[in-house]
Amino acid sequence: MGGGESEKRLFTKGLVFHENYLLHETGGHPERKERLMAIMDYLHEEAVLAQLALVEAREATLQEVALNHDPDYIEEIRRFCGRGGGHLDPDTVVCRDSYKAALWAVGGALAAVDAVLEGGLSSVFCAVRPPGHHALRNRAMGFCVFNNVAVAARYAREKGVERVLIVDWDAHHGNGTQVAFYDDPSVFYFSTHQWPLYPGTGRAEERGVGAGLGYTLNCPLPPGSGDEEFFRVYDQEFLPVALEYRPELILISAGYDAHELDPLTSLELTTQGYGRLAHRVARLAQEVRAPVVALLEGGYSLSALARSVAATIEALP
Ligand SMILES: [Zn+2]
């Protein structure tokens, strides 16, 4: 190998990170900026970072956020943060700069979608916060302000992607994402989550309505479920349906609170287990020739989070 190797290196995997994601200060809350710092430190230490194309994040426009949120709600968040912040709901705390961080989190997701649709990357992992999958059209919930994955799916649809698959492996059900696409066959929502647990949605009987019937797949799991239970659900319930759906883009609501070390939940996925879920998604992606964008959701054990994110990136195409 001669010189100039670095300029000629062809990346297939990308990463979104921006220091503005650290502006969202939450005090003693489990969803804290140290989560991203732990991820970035670990990716650097393990030399994963050097294998990734850094995708430039940006601020989402109001019009883009409004693809999934009421303009009045967006304005309410801007004002609430501008007055110094506080609690948006019992679980969701914001500071003065959280509005900016939230716009950048959405923008990071959109930059990643552009990078896989137009930039030639096969997958992008977005180390963004605040997370998004509980956020409703007009309401913050469960540490989430704007629904990053839902805006990303709508943005991809506007760009001509006909079928988007959302895989949500966070320990909690992504109620905000489900409701956004409940009657919409163009976005398939699949979730594994601990049951019973916050927010209380995501029963197996919830399968969509109208034209969307059959395009929501919920697989609730009892506390204590670990790798084997997850693999069974992926292999037997999810992958056959996903292959038939033939998504053109796969989004992952990548939450790491289903990890056995997570302090908030009682699922027992291992770090390797997360890698093997990501590997299953990667195989699906290759089979249907769809790129993958993973967006960070939960995950509150710093070491488990960092290692599981690395395992995910390793497995993605
Ligand atoms: Zn969660």
Image: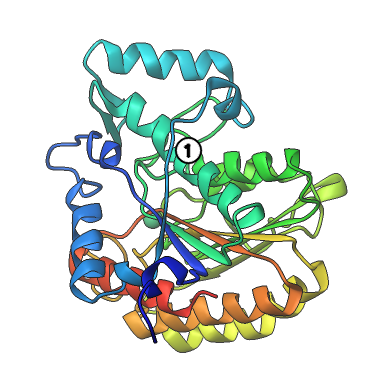
Return the residue nearer the eye: 155 or 215: 155
Mark 1, Cα crowd under 10 Å, few <14 / some 14-19 / many 20+, is many
Return the residue nearer the eye: 216 or 65: 65
Q: Ligand 1 falls in which quarter?
A: bottom left
| Res 47 → quadrant | bottom left
- Residue 249 in the image: x percent, y percent? 68, 59
Residue at image x 37%, y 77%?
Answer: 311
**Which type of secondary structure does the marked residue at label 1 adopt?**
helix
Is residue 201 something that shows in the picture? no
Outermost residue on the right side: it is 211
| Res 232 → quadrant | bottom right
Amino acid tagged 1: Val
Quarter of the figure with the N terminus? bottom left
Residue at image x 25%, y 62%?
Answer: 39
Query: In this image, 242 relative to 45: left or right?
Result: right
Q: How is the image coloured?
A: rainbow
Query: In this image, 145 relative to 114: left or right?
Result: left
Residue at image x 58%, y 27%?
Answer: 69
Return the residue nearer the eye: 274 or 4: 4
Residue under label 1: 106
- Residue 246 in the image: x percent, y percent? 79, 68
Position of 61 relative to 300 (above/below)? above
Position of 4 relative to 112 (above/below)? below
- Residue 252 in the image: x percent, y percent? 53, 60
Return the residue nearer the eye: 198 or 142: 142
Position of 122 relative to 67 (above/below)? below
Residue at image x 33%, y 32%?
Answer: 101
Position of 277 relative to 93 (above/below)? below
Quarter of the figure with the C terminus? bottom right
